[in-house]
Structures are given as C-alpha cells and as structure tokens.
Amino acid sequence: MTRISVKFLALILMLVCQAVSADIFRPAYLELSQLDAQRYSVLWRVPALPDNRRLAARVVYPANTERVGEARTAIINNAWEERYEILAAGSLIDQQVTIEGILGGATDVIVRIERLDGTTQLGRLQPAEPVFTVTASPGPGEVAVAYFVLGVEHILGGIDHLLFVLALLLLVGNLRRLLLTITAFTVAHSITLVCATLGWISLPGPPVEAVIALSIVFVAAEVIHEQQGRASLTARSPWLVAFGFGLLHGLGFAGALQEVGLPETAIPVALLMFNVGVEAGQLLFVAGVVILGALLSRVALVPATMVKRLVSYAIGSVAAFWTIERVAAFV
C-alpha cells in the first residue's frame, strides 16, 4: 500500500492527541477479604488528584451491611487508601455493592473478593455500570473468563503500549516481518509478566514506566531514520528491538496484574488467561489498524511517506512528554 487516506491519518492523530493526557493503568481498587461467615476487612484505594485532593467516590453496601470499628485512612504511593471492617448480617452472597460517583468517569474500579475457602471473585466496574454482584465460590472456568477479560481490557486501555505497537507497525514493511516482530514482543513480555507476577524478579514501577515511554520515543525516531535512508539494525531486524523492549512492557503488564492479585486456588489459570487476554487485545488492535488502513486507503489519498512521518513525530512527541513527566514524578 503506497498511499493512505486523510481520514485514516486524522483517526491516528486523534488517538495520539488523546494519549497526551493518558496515564498508566491506575484504576480505583476495592478489596473485601472474608474474615468469617459475616465479617470482611475492606481496602478502598483511589488515585489521588493533584495536591493530594481526594475524589468524591464512595462504596455503597447492601442494606444488611454495616461498618465495624474506625476507618484508617492514609496517602500511599499517590493514592488514598481507606481500611475498615464491615459486618454483613446473613451473607453478602447475591448482594450488590455499588460505587457512587465513580470518579466522574475518570477511571474504572477493580473489585476483588477473597473468600475463606481461598477462592477469589474479580470484577471491573465502569462508569456506565458501577454495580458488582457478590457470587458464591467460582469454578476455574469463571476465573479464566474474568482474567481473560481483564487482560483484554488492560491492553486496549493502555495507550502507551498501543502506541509502541503502532510505532512497530510503521517500522515493519511486510506481513512476514510483522508476524516475527509481534511474536517477539509477545514472547518477551510474557516472560517478564510471569516472572514479575510470581515474584521472581522485582523492579520499582515508576522507572519501568519511564523507560517504557522512552522505548516509544526510540521506535518513533527509528521510523524517521528509516525514511531518511539511515536504516539501522532496528529497521533491518525490528523483532530484536521488539523483544528487548517487550521485556520492559511485560513488567508494566505485571504491575497492573499485581494491583489486582491472583486467586490462591487458581494461580496458573489466572496468570495464563490474563496473558492470553493481553495477546488477544493486542491482536485486535493490530488487525483493526491494518484493516482500517486498507479500507480507507482508497479514499482521499495522501502520500504514505507523509502520513508515516507525521504520525511518527506525533507518537514520539507524546512519548517524550510522558518520559519527562514520569521521570519528574520519581526524581
């Protein structure tokens, strides 16, 4: 394909421009750990606003539930955390927990229920449907579906990861090279996702996120260099770069999964299905970009070289902003 439509260019630039205000995966988090038949310890965490202001979102429990004792509140890792206990007369099974004022639609809420038998229920609430129904202990199939969906939603909501994949697509010239590159990226981040989630390796999150942003700058610059006739090893063998930076992106995925946790009775299933969900979401994005580009390439044509250059500069600029912002946050 030698020419790409103006509409396709506008769509990509809109995605990039919206990404300027995007942040790393930071959902609100509600965890209920069962202490006995009726009591639960609660952890309610929401990202802090600038100047450590607190968001107005709150948890609403069913009518048969009441708080027990005093709540403990603190700011930890740029988030407000509140810990307390609740007493559910009878049971929470088949009852609904609602999040009111779900952060003004700014983010989602991860809900995790840990039962006495070691099983876990996981859900992700969005502004359109902020209600979570507590169910009985799930089987392996329900765990698999929950973590698969979480993986898909995480990658499709991770603008930084998607921009890295988009930059790789601009760099790769044909289908064979595309398959090799995506496979290398997949293998690499699968390795570090598993190792970091299981605690075999540990790196602080903020520096990792900063280097992830820097990896996007690097690949975007390589696209420009390739257009200028300065083909480097990256342009000749993009799968090598995809594998190297994929190791870092895997640590980013692991950070999101560690926020949610793994069910003690189904760790292999949950870990596998989260990773499969990430890959499925990534392939959906790649297929969507390729198909949309092919469909729109017949309308309002402009030179492909111009599109590639503009999009590369836009991606690189956004990623450079992220790099500075993330480095400044932990220095």
Image (cartoon, rainbow, N blue to C red):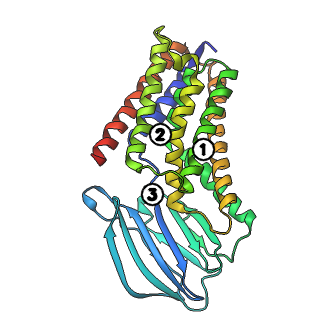
Q: Which mark is residue 160?
A: 2
What quarter of the picture does the C terminus occupy?
A: top left
Residue drawn at (47%, 39%) of the image: 160
Q: Which mark is residue 205?
A: none
Mark 2 and mark 1: span between their CA atoms? 19 Å
**292 relative to 95, above or below:** above
The residue to which callout 1 is attached is 191
Looking at the image, tell me whether mark 3 or mark 2 is earlier in sequence order: 3
Mark 2: few/some/many CA within 10 Å (<14, 14-19, 20+):
many
Residue drawn at (62%, 17%) of the image: 173
Q: Is mark 1 on a helix, strand or loop?
A: helix
Residue furthest out toward the bottom: 89
The residue to which callout 3 is attached is 105
Q: Image quarter for residue 112?
A: bottom right
Looking at the image, tell me whether mark 2 or mark 1 is earlier in sequence order: 2
Residue furthest out toward the top: 229
**54 relative to 149, above or below:** below
- The answer to whether residue 139 is left or right of residue 121 is right
